[in-house]
Image (tube, grey):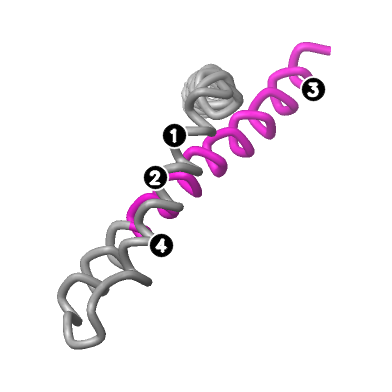
């Protein structure tokens, strides 16, 4: 009886792992589509350019304006990194699913 329960637990864990991989793969594909869109890329590039210009054009004594622009740039870059990481994790998950299905 105990051996049967261990097998069932192992099967459940395997199913959970494959479900998580499937969700990660689907999410990665959605992120890939989003990031690859030329309009999205243009938005990110333009947004960063405007913030850098705002930082550079701020009066030397206006530390708050430069700090605010720098924080916004950092937040935008972290968001882009989040999306890129999601694409990478999704591609790894897709590879796991392909190995499991062969």
Q: Residue furthest bottom?
A: 61
Which of the labelled discs sits on residue 52, or is there none?
4
Residue 35 figure quarter: top right
Report the side of 98 relative to 88 (left or right): right
**Mark 1 residue element:** helix
Is residue 84 magenta-colored? yes
Mark 2–mark 4 distance (CA, rounded to whole Å): 9 Å
Q: Which mark's residue is nearer the viewer, 3 or 1?
A: 1
Mark 1–mark 2 distance (CA, rounded to whole Å): 6 Å
* Front one among 46 and 32: 46
Q: Which residue is mark 1?
A: 43
Q: Which mark's residue is nearer the viewer, 4 or 3?
A: 4
Q: Position of residue 71 (x, y in %)?
A: 28, 65
* Front one among 23 and 16: 23
Q: Which residue is mark 3?
A: 99
* Front one among 51 and 28: 51
Q: Residue at x 69, y 20 (%)?
A: 97
Which is more N-terminal, label 4 or label 1? 1
Q: Position of residue 21 (x, y in %)?
A: 56, 25
On the rendered image, what quadrant is the C terminus found in? top right
Magenta region:
73-102
């Amino acid at each position: 009886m105990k051996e049967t329960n261990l097998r069932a637990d192992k099967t459940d864990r395997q199913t959970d792992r494959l479900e998580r991989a499937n969700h990660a793969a689907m999410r990665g594909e959605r992120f890939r589509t989003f990031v690859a869109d030329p309009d999205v890329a243009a938005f990110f590039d333009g947004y960063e350019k405007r913030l850098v210009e705002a930082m550079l054009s701020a009066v030397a004594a206006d530390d708050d304006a430069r700090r605010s622009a720098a924080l916004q740039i950092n937040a935008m870059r972290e968001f882009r990194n989040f999306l890129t990481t999601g694409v990478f994790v999704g591609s790894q998950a897709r590879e796991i699913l392909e190995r499991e299905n062969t």
